[in-house]
Amino acid sequence: MIHFVLLISRQGKVRLTKWYSPYSQKERSKVIRELSSEILSRGPKLCNFVEWRGFKVVYKRYASLYFCICNDQDDNELETLSIIHHYVETLDRYFGSVCELDLIFNFHKAYFILDEILLAGEMQETSKRTTLRLIAAQEELLEAAKEEASSLSSIIAQATK
Amino acid sequence: MDPILNPFSSGTRLRDMIRAIRACKTAAEERAAIRKECAAIRTSINENDPDYRHRNLAKLMFIHMLGYPTHFGQMECLKCIASPGFPEKRIGYLGLMLLLDERQEVLMLVTNSLKQDLNHMNQYIVGLALCALGNICSAEMARDLAPEVERLLQFRDPNIRKKAALCSIRIIKKVPDLAENFVKPATALLKEKHHGVLITAVQLCADLCKVSREALEHIRKKCTEGLVRTLKDLANSSYSPEYDVSGITDPFLHIRLLKLLRLLGEGDADASDSMNDILAQVGTKTESNKVAANAILYECVQTIMSIEGNGGLRVLAIGILGKFLSNRDNNIRYVALNMLMKAVTADPQAVLRYRATILECVKDADASIRKRALELVYVLVNESNVKPLTTELVSYLETCDQDFKGDLTAKICSIVSKFSPEKIWYIDQMIKVLLEAGSFVKDEVWRALIVVISNASELHGYAVRALYKAFQKSNEQEAFTRVAIWCIGEYGDLLINNVGMLDLEDRITVTESDAVDLIEITIQCHALDFTTKAMALVALLKLSSRFPSCSERIREIIVKYKGNFVLELQQRSIEFNSIIARHQNIRSMLVERMPVLDEATFIGRQAGSLPDAGSISAGSSVSLPNGVAKPADSLVDLLDLNSNDAPAPSSSGGDFLQDLLGVDLSPAAQSGANQTSKSGTDALLDLLSVGSVSGPVESPSAQSNSSAIDILSASKSEKASVSPLDDLSSLSLSSRTTSITGAAPMMDLLDGFASTPPKSENNGTVYPSITAFESSSLQLTFNFSKQPGNSQTTNIQATFINLSSDEYTDFIFQAAVPKFLQLQLDPASGSTLPANGNGSITQNFRVTNSQNGKKSLVMRIRITYKINGKEKLEEGQISNFPRDL
């Protein structure tokens, strides 16, 4: 089971945190501090696994971002690497060659996409197309709500004129 | 308020806020910006304007990610979730998952909204609620909402079914009792074609198997075949672009299926049999150098290793690992090492084939790989390969990183002390390690070396010469210096006279003053701490007697320390000075060679301290230097473990009684720590089982000094049949019973006062006498009677009859009982047993059975006596007690 997902920039800034196991807010910041110093200091050619507090943290660097997933000791590390890659590819398709800035300004979208791929610390959907279709459908709902709201406010504006 | 003039107001858009924060050049600037923004958000929250709620929450999440407190926004999440629109709900649930954790009470407030949303018309809102529930639900919420989730497992849209399946995983993890409700719907989902539903169903089934035995049986019986077919179809499926990952269709599903099959196959030969073919197929046909393919192979190997044995498959699996190990990708090598660790128990010989490669990995540049490899080597070592492996490791010690040296040193020391075939090799290796990484060697390890040297009388000369030679080259390592100084002090005479030369040694010429020089140089070295200097002073004192010609010079060196700031050194200096100067006549007696240190005691102590050191975490046995330790009674050191002042093995029986109590209490106090570490160490278990013997009481007439130890060893062997975990858990209980022992008679007394029980009860049941023990020379019968008003306690009268034609003297009877019993022995009627049955000894004792009615009595006995001054010993177990005692 996945316990948490972290996205950390090379400068140590947090770009996304997702917790599937209960960590108090205090523990969360401690975990982030500990792991980012450990992971950021590792050389480029080393393996992508760090043993940490009885768990295994699998990380992979894409451009300036480190994607980290904390797993149980006996989970398949190579699969976790594939999950990270799957997530990155999905982001890439969604944003169209994703970069760190996309994830900063649209951090909530990164969360929504992650929520369609992982749930309760397990894999939810393995098809990128399905994931993106679901995201698109929900965005349509948003647009519809927005339009409705604006038409509503124009009606009110007219009525109160 | 114009948003352009004031970038920090609730009117600013999220994007502008992020931009403004990113524009901050210093941390202080950023803090100020965020403070301002938070203030604006708070005002907006207080105004309760629903239009900005969505935006405020998004901003708060960003601020939260930067690590600032945002608790004031928690209620906003709830308001958003409660509002009717999809956009608000979506951001509200996201905030809920990010800003709260399951321990916060606020979360309880959301249960009702969740319930409503789980029943919502709009399937996307249902999806949001499921997602939030799956990620953060607590046990209470799980209980409340389980029926909804269960129903959603049959929802028309597959995307909701898959979310509900994962949500169920969270629920059964939080409340395992609910598992049975989910078994049926979960197995129904396994038949689906939609990959999302299928993979989540497989995961749900795997978790069901983990929490419930019945679920495991059910799924094993009903679904194994279907799952094997699904995996087969998947493995043989043609290219499908939607699920393709570098040439493989849905590796994630592959892996989850293999994982579930592993759970089903474990411990069940039939299920394992049915999956052999597909495992072989996956193991052979998956060929690729891509991560996804290797992930599948890795999972497949893991499954093969876990299910019930099939030789061919195992060979295939080990072969795959071998290929992994020679891969250039560090990740692949890492998982191979990881897997070999598990394979070691199944097939150590196969793993040993990769010894060379594994040793290479110990020297890898990557810390994670090094650590794995070292642990693997540690497990692989045995008596036959310890020499080459240690040589490799020790030679690597010279070149490895500083931060790895600690681990490596600890492992080498542990290996060397555990498997060393002979003492001389042990001494050699330890000297090498001390020279190379003395600062990483734990105190007890170098002390152990001294103990070993002092015990090996034939190697005294060799050891001191080897240490002297090494010491001349380097004195940087303090631990080494201490050992060397100690040995030179003790065995200085052997050093200069080349006493006890071994064939393999070169002769060295050391004069008396050379040896003194060496110590003088050492003691003047400022880097050394005062313990070492104090040891050096003692060594000098010893040498002053061994080398009378240097005596005056030594005195001068010692005198220099009489004004030292360290009290210890000052005192030693002054005292030693006066010994050398004024007490010539007794000096040689004073500084005689140390008596041989008790190795068993030391090892026992060490074993006791090991759980803290963590050096036996691999579940290995005590670091008893095989072939180094003398076959001492291991019980002696067990006793010693717990009492801080070592009881000399010659102490009298009475002392041991106290020790027994000490033994009984102290492990119980430690049990908390030990239980968690559960390191499975033999020593630890022995120690614990000693603790759990509930009061084997020595008969007061006993005079033999070893008897208490014997009693313990008897009860220890009995304990061997009891599972160690049992012992662990019952520890505290047993210590309690011990403390009650003293109080029991008192309670009996009170009983007697309170009510005089009717006689009939006393005589209600008459128990037949039994012949408890009979040998060619001795017969023992037990008569039973119950104590009035106390059904748990039985009075037993033991009668001993001598069947041989010799008189027995010094007759001692000892008994031990398992922990649910309690035993009190009265003094025996005598210690001499006449020959040919012309008389008997009787001895009364009481047994209290805490499990009266459930378990019957059982007892181990041991009888010692002398025939014409020759010791005899008889032992036995008594289990033919009447049932309801």
Image (cartoon, coloured by chain):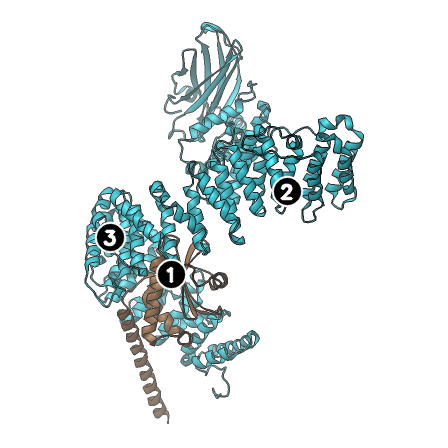
**In this figure, which residue is indicated by the disc labeled 3?**
B284
**In this figure, which residue is indicated by the disc labeled 2?**
B472
Tell me the shade of chain A: brown
Q: Residue shown at 31%/83% (left/top)?
A: A148
* Left or right for B256, reference B631: left
**In this figure, which residue is indicated by the disc labeled 1?**
B137
For the residue marked with disc 1, what is the amino acid? Answer: Cys
> Is B712 drawn above or below residue B436 in the view shown?
above
Q: Residues within 10 Å of mark 1 (few under 14, many from 20)?
A: many
Closer to the camera in the image, B692 or B687: B687
Closer to the camera in the image, B701 or B334: B334
Q: CA distance from mark 1 to mark 3?
A: 42 Å
Q: CA distance from mark 1 to mark 2?
A: 67 Å
For the residue marked with disc 3, what is the amino acid? Answer: Thr
Q: Residues within 10 Å of mark 2 (few under 14, many from 20)?
A: few
- Residue depth check, mark 1 versus mark 2: number of the one nearer the observer: 2
Q: Chain of mark 1?
A: B
Residue B817 visible here? yes
Looking at the rendering, in which quadrant would you find the C terminus of chain B? Answer: top left
> Is B661 drawn above or below residue B564 in the view shown?
above
> Is B250 drawn above or below residue B570 in the view shown?
below
Numbered circles on residues, count: 3
Q: Chain of mark 2?
A: B
